[in-house]
Image (tube, rainbow, N blue to C red):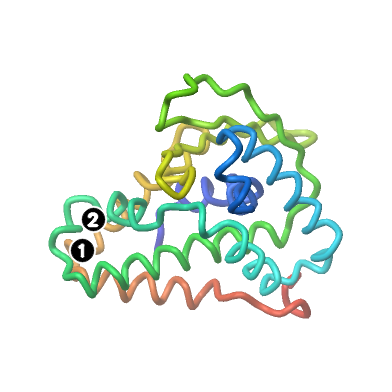
């Protein structure tokens, strides 16, 4: 089972993290903060207008089309696996990356299916124009609760800005997974970690619109 704190962090981040980045052409033209703001609002609009039934399959398709190209899952996976990454074969590293990507997408999709009109406060970017490694800060606002601080660690690469970690209230998504993954590898090896991820992904597989709200 994944750490409780990680599940809470992922749920809190989902409303923003799963809808943050899209539009490859814009990624080349805009700064990371402008990209986050403009595309977040665009994709929120899509969810509100076209996915009002909470259909997770539609949400997963939206994430895969708009978000995945802008996350560096290879870097995120290697960082989450940590010191055990070098123990994995090339084939195992590929499988780990695939399963980790699927886990994040489906976790985000589950939370987005329950999206209920949260608002976003996009904070000014504190970085120099020449910086290639920045943090974009967003606060998720919801009536009756304290704002949730979301920090997106992003790196500028040849093909645009990429997210390599997400921190919720100061808690790193990657670091939380690292603790859990390290325990799994110690108990059952790299193959055991892959199997655990596969089982977790099956347990949160996308559902149809008819069952999304159950």
Circles 1 and 2: CB distance less than 8 Å?
yes
Indicate the position of residue 1 as horizontal and vertical percent values: 40, 63
Q: Nearer the viewer, residue 16 or 147?
A: 16
The residue under label 2 is 182
Which residue, as the protein is rendered here, is positioned at the far right? 49
Q: Viewed as shown, does residue 175 lie left or right of 165?
A: left
Figure quadrant of the C terminus: bottom right
Q: Viewed as shown, does residue 32 lie left or right of 158?
A: right
Q: Is residue 183 above or below residue 190?
A: above
**SS type, badge 1:** helix
**SS type, badge 2:** helix
- Give me the C-alpha separation between circle 1 and circle 2: 5 Å
Q: What residue is shown at x 41% (from left), y 76% (from top)?
A: 199
Q: Is residue 53 above or below residue 66?
A: below
The residue under label 1 is 185
Label for residue 144?
none
Q: What residue is shown at x 82% (from left), y 69% (from top)?
A: 53
Q: What residue is shown at x 55% (from left), y 44% (from top)?
A: 28
Callout 2 crowding tier (Cα within 10 Å): few <14, some 14–19, many ≥20: some
Q: Nearer the viewer, residue 10 or 94?
A: 94
Q: Is residue 174 above or below residue 209?
A: above
Indicate the position of residue 141 as horizontal and vertical percent values: 73, 34
Indicate the position of residue 43 as horizontal and vertical percent values: 73, 53
Q: Nearer the viewer, residue 138 or 143?
A: 138
């Amino acid at each position: 089972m994944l750490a409780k704190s990680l599940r809470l962090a992922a749920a809190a981040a989902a409303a923003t993290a799963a809808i943050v980045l899209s539009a490859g052409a814009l990624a080349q033209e805009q700064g990371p903060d402008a990209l986050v703001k403009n595309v977040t609002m665009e994709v929120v609009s899509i969810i509100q207008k076209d996915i009002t039934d909470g259909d997770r399959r539609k949400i997963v398709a939206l994430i895969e089309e708009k978000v995945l190209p802008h996350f560096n899952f290879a870097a995120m996976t290697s960082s989450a696996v940590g010191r055990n990454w070098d123990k994995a074969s090339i084939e195992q590293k590929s499988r780990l990356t695939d399963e980790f990507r699927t886990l994040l997408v489906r976790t985000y999709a589950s939370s987005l299916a329950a999206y209920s009109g949260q608002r976003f406060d996009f904070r000014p970017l504190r970085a120099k124009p020449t910086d290639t490694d920045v943090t974009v800060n967003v606060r998720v606002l919801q009536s009756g609760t304290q704002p949730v601080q979301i920090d997106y660690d992003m790196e500028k690469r040849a093909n645009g800005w990429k997210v390599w970690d997400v921190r919720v209230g100061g808690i790193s998504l990657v670091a939380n997974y690292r603790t859990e993954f390290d325990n799994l590898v110690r108990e059952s090896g790299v193959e055991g970690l892959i199997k655990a991820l596969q089982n977790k992904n099956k347990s949160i597989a996308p559902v149809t619109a008819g069952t999304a709200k159950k």
